[in-house]
Amino acid sequence: MREILGRRRRLLPRRGDGGPELIGAALTFAAQWQWPVLPGVAADPQGRSRCGCPDPECTVPGAHPFDPGLLAATTDPRMVRWWWGNRPTAPIILATGGKAPCAVSLPALPAARALAVLDRRGVRLGPVVASPARWSVLVKPYSMEQLGELLYAQDFVPGSLRFHGEGGYLALPPSETAQGGLRWERAPLPGSASPWVPDVEAVVDAVVEALTRTGVSAPEL
């Protein structure tokens, strides 16, 4: 049992006193909103800019699942309490797709410009996760076929857009990663119900148009 749930505690060292905040958030996501979550691998305690996983060239340091793997994600509050009871500073990883939201992410500076344009246009957005490097707009679950058709219909799609769909994952606030802390740029409304999120079509169409209108160049993206 201990082996299945993650025996390599050295990957998620205890640091600080943020455990209650993290476990509280993880329980809200899992038990109240029915979003499957699991603890992620932490940053390397010997070098905060590096990941604690065995990959020396990890591209998402401190912000991905490792042990346990993504398939272990659950909405069971007992498991959530067990995990974060043993790993109180572990990043919270959302398994995207299924009944959980997916996400569209882009670099922070273009994202801030795009959201400003969307606000002026009255486009309704749901929660937005912000890290120092990237912002992620949560959207309704979508299929790969749906996404492929959507992208094919676009005249221009920035190469730096990332899509966290079925079988993917996303770190959620208030997690700390090797790249910095995560926060809600647009926080979910308080309450027990799962937050509303928009369709992926509305987000991609609006983001691409907003980026085009703001004149963000391809290198900046």
Image (cartoon, rainbow, N blue to C red):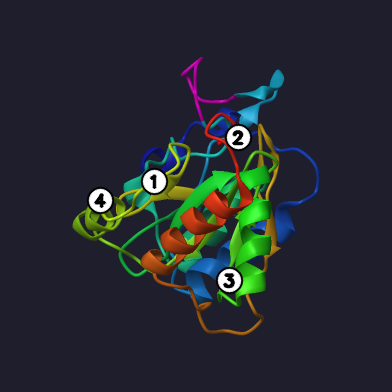
Percent coordinates x, y for residue 98 in the rendering: 30, 65
Quadrant where the C terminus sits is: top right
Percent coordinates x, y for residue 45 in the rendering: 70, 24
Q: Farthest right residue? A: 17
The quarter holding residue 26 reads bottom right
Residue at x 70% of width, y 19% of height:
47
Instruction: Kindly identify the amino acid type of the residue bearing the numbered disc 4.
Output: Tyr
Name the residue carrying label 1: 156
Magenta residues? 51-59
Depth check: give the residue in front, 5 or 139: 139
Circle 2 crowding by C-alpha within 10 Å: few under 14, some 14–19, many from 20: many
Residue at x 56% of width, y 57% of height:
210
Q: Earlier in the sequence, mark 2 or mark 1?
A: 2
Percent coordinates x, y for residue 190 in the rendering: 66, 81
Name the residue carrying label 3: 28
Disc 3 + disc 4, Cβ < 8 Å: no
For residue 33, side relative to residue 146 (left or right):
right
Instruction: Kindly identify the amino acid type of the residue bearing the numbered disc 1.
Output: Phe
Task: Measure the alpha-carbon separation of dots 2 and 1.
Answer: 36 Å
**Within the magenta stretch, is there residue 55?**
yes
Check disc 2 and report its element: helix, strand or loop: loop
Mark 1 or mark 3, whichever is nearer to me:
1
Task: Measure the alpha-carbon separation of dots 2 and 3.
Answer: 21 Å
What label sits on residue 128 in the rendered view? none
Check disc 4 and report its element: helix, strand or loop: helix
Q: Can residue 203 be seen in this view?
A: yes
Instruction: Kindly identify the amino acid type of the residue bearing the numbered disc 2.
Output: Ala
Q: Earlier in the sequence, mark 3 or mark 4?
A: 3
Disc 4 + disc 1, Cβ < 8 Å: no
